[in-house]
Amino acid sequence: MPVISRGEVSYVTGAASAGIGRALVELLVGQGGLVIIADLNAEVGAKLASELNEKAGSMVAIFVKTDTTIWEDQLAGFEKAVQSFKRIDYVFANAGIAEHPWLPPFNPETAASRPIVKPDLATANIDLTGQLYTAALALQTFERQEIGPSGFRGKLILTASVFAYYPSRAMPMYAASKAGIINFMRSAAQYYSTKNITVNAVSPNLVDTPIAPDVLFVPFRERKLLSNIDLVIEQFQKFLGDSTINGQALSISQDHVWAHPPDTYMFEENDPACDLISVELFKLFGDSTK
């Protein structure tokens, strides 16, 4: 299993509370890495950084209070990271929330008595826009630094979900956001493939974390339908160090692990136009990428 080089720096969003982000931080510090814990929960995040530093006997972690939906918050976090550790080798765009109902429940009997409301896009703001803010900062930071000890300018790893591939009648905003992340990941991986930068994603099914109220997990525990967080973290580790994997969506459901393939239905018929639009747009954008 690949590991990071000692002293490499990782920036992890949504890393304070128990869950995927915190497990990643503990893994990275355990491998001799330095971490930036980016989270909205200042009390828990600062405490985690303090505990890691005390255990290590040196500064291995810093906390930055970050609302990932606010560009300026994320920019300040990245600036503090570079100021503190000089570079960032890995960025984990991990912060996310569960579904917030975007519209009221469908009820024709009461609809006429209710005003038409603006949709609640909180889920998309965090799970899609927030992750894209993180990605934009990661990729521009990597562009401004030299190749690191593992042979890359940097690596971006996004937390997605199997709901990126499968629709959910109860989670349209979550599914739309995660699908957007996967297609962004595959597109960005193509763009950066010759630039010493890798872009990948990990897509678990439901994991027992604080992302949702505990009562939601009870029937899944009873039916043994939860995915093991240790198995999820193993998939993140496959992208670390000198791994050359790029453009992959490593997916987990219970004890099943697979690399989810891109949709290739009617690909041969569409590829000439899809490829040509990239060529022509790069000309318009003044981008030398082929």
Image: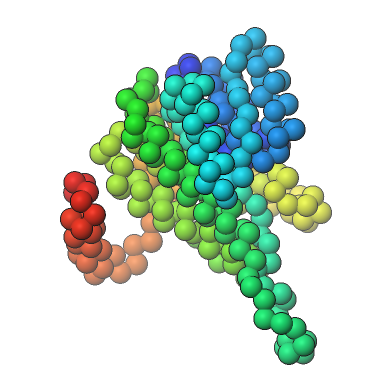
Name the quadrant containing residue 150: top left
The percent position of residue 221, horizontal first and vertical second, equals 76, 50
| Residue at 63% over, 70% down | 119
The percent position of residue 184, horizontal first and vertical second, equals 41, 53
| Residue at 33% over, 35% down | 143
| Residue at 75% over, 83% down | 114
Model colouring: rainbow
| Residue at 58% over, 18% down | 60
The percent position of residue 87, horizontal first and vertical second, equals 43, 25
**Name of the residue lying farthest toward the top:** 57
Give left or right: position of 219 versus 27.
Answer: right
Give left or right: position of 158 versus 43.
Answer: left
Whether residue 27 appears in this view of the structure is: no
Name the quadrant containing residue 269: bottom left
Compared to 26, does 255 lie above or below?
below
The percent position of residue 276, horizontal first and vertical second, equals 19, 62
